[in-house]
Image: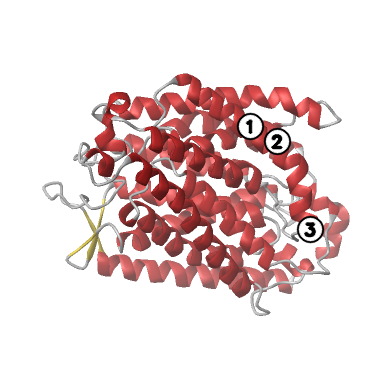
Amino acid sequence: MAERAAARLHLSGLCFFLQLLTIVLFATFVRYSPESSNLCSTEPRCSQRDPSPTLGYPRFRDAHLRALLGFGFLLAFLSRYGVGSVAGSLLIVAFTIQWAILAQGLFYFSQNSKIYVSTQSMVSADFCTAAILISTGAVLGRVNPIQMLLMALLEVPLFACNEYILRSILGVSDSGGSLTIHTFGAYFGLTVSRALHQPHEDKRKEQQDVGHGPDVFAVVGTICLWIFWPSFASATTAHDSAEPWAVLNLYFSLAASTLATFILSPILYEEGTLQVAQLQDATLASTAVMGMAGEMLSTPFGALTAGFLASQLSLLSSRFLSPILRSRLKTEDTCGVHNVHGLPGILGTFLGTLLAALATADVFGDRLQLVFPLVADGSRTTAEQAQWQLCGLVVTLLLAALGGGLTGALLRTKVLRSPPERNELESKALREVDEDGCDHGTSSEERRTIA
């Protein structure tokens, strides 16, 4: 009991410090954007065709609901940590949104030493939150809440830096985040997981158990992704013909990816019964592959093909690559982010690179200026744009690996690392308890041990 109390005090102290820090920084630098000022013209996600703050609210609402409900419930993966993972998601979302406003503001929203925010900047913060939640999925159940917060604290500025390099310096088109969200978040988290590996770590089998509660959470999360992700993926596109392309292409991709799961899953898995986890993986894989190409594909069959390939790639990777990742590379991937975000994100980048090489005014019309402005004004050829799209993948992987390695090394220090028993106690600080103080996720024997 004393160790649980100490864990809660440590978490409480860190949350107090981070909240106080953000309040001071907000008071010093952050202001609301005046309606009469054109303050977001330098920010790639900010649309000049949406000048009114109220018009941007539906996009912010859908993006935020996707972060809270979609990813929040999908992270309820382990029966032992199911409820705690949802609480952990809320903890990460609450902190990351505030921290992302500050980190991204240094690159996009700064004028006169101030950071001006609007609903569009909140959408950008939600994009950042999605990447952090993906990274968290790779280490879920293996880090304590303090480590989760510190991981977000370090990852958010690096996410903002990577996003700025890709969009503002390299001119990469990635409105839905195949690179900036899925690929970066997945490989940052995987690198952290690799750095946290301990040769003699106790691999308790019960951590991999999935109960009925988490299944229900996963179903709700998957449905929320179907409802809100098309709006989320098109949140940074222009309010004209570009937006329907992004929305419709993602819906076609979702449908093909989900159906394709029923094709390969019975072949790869002996039980023959489709698991809820496989459906949610198919949903996420299709969103990852369409992040870059969503506003580029000019035909529905291309979206169907991309969704089909993403689902097959995710299933094959889960069946054959995950064991290699765990046994040979010593990298635990709790929620399978490599299968549903990393590889599909890379596939989406290759697809976006191909479409960039084939982009012409005859196909895109006036939309060419919106999707590839440097190609439209003659600053680049389509071949050069394709090269820069591919270069963005290299930059993203390098920053994710470097940042994840350094973050993992920090989290592994003796001061922050907890032994397995204490780590479990610290995780219980975010879980529900009965009126008699018993934890819902523990057995009667565990309760007696804790007491």
Please state the horizontal and vertical placement of residue 88, each as a whole percent of the image. Answer: 59, 54
Q: Work out how far the residue at label 3 is from the one at label 1, CA to CA, in angstroms.
A: 24 Å
* Residue 198 visible in the picture: yes
Marked residue nearer the N-terminal end (3 or 2):
2
The tag on residue 328 is 3
Q: Quadrant of the C terminus?
A: bottom right
Secondary structure under the numbered disc 3 in the rendered image: loop
Sooner in the amino-acid sequence: mark 3 or mark 1: 1
158 shown above or below 209: below
Q: Nearer the viewer, mark 3 or mark 2?
A: 3
The Cα–Cα distance between marks 3 and 2, rounded to whole angstroms, is 20 Å
Q: Nearer the viewer, residue 389 or 122?
A: 389
Q: Residue at x 70, y 35 (%)?
A: 315
Amino acid at dot 3 = Arg
- Helix, strand or loop at label 1? It is helix
Asked which secondary structure carries label 2, the reply is: helix
Q: Position of residue 83 (x, y in %)?
A: 66, 48
Q: Amino acid at mark 1?
A: Ser
Identify the residue under disc 1. 311
> Vertically, is 222 above or below 100?
above
Pointer 2 residue: 315
Q: Residue furthest right?
A: 445
Q: Nearer the viewer, residue 305 or 123?
A: 305
Q: Residues within 10 Å of mark 3 (few under 14, many from 20)?
A: few
Residue 209 image offset from top left, x and y in percent: 80, 45
Is residue 88 shown above or below 312? below
**Whole-percent x and y of residue 308?**
60, 27
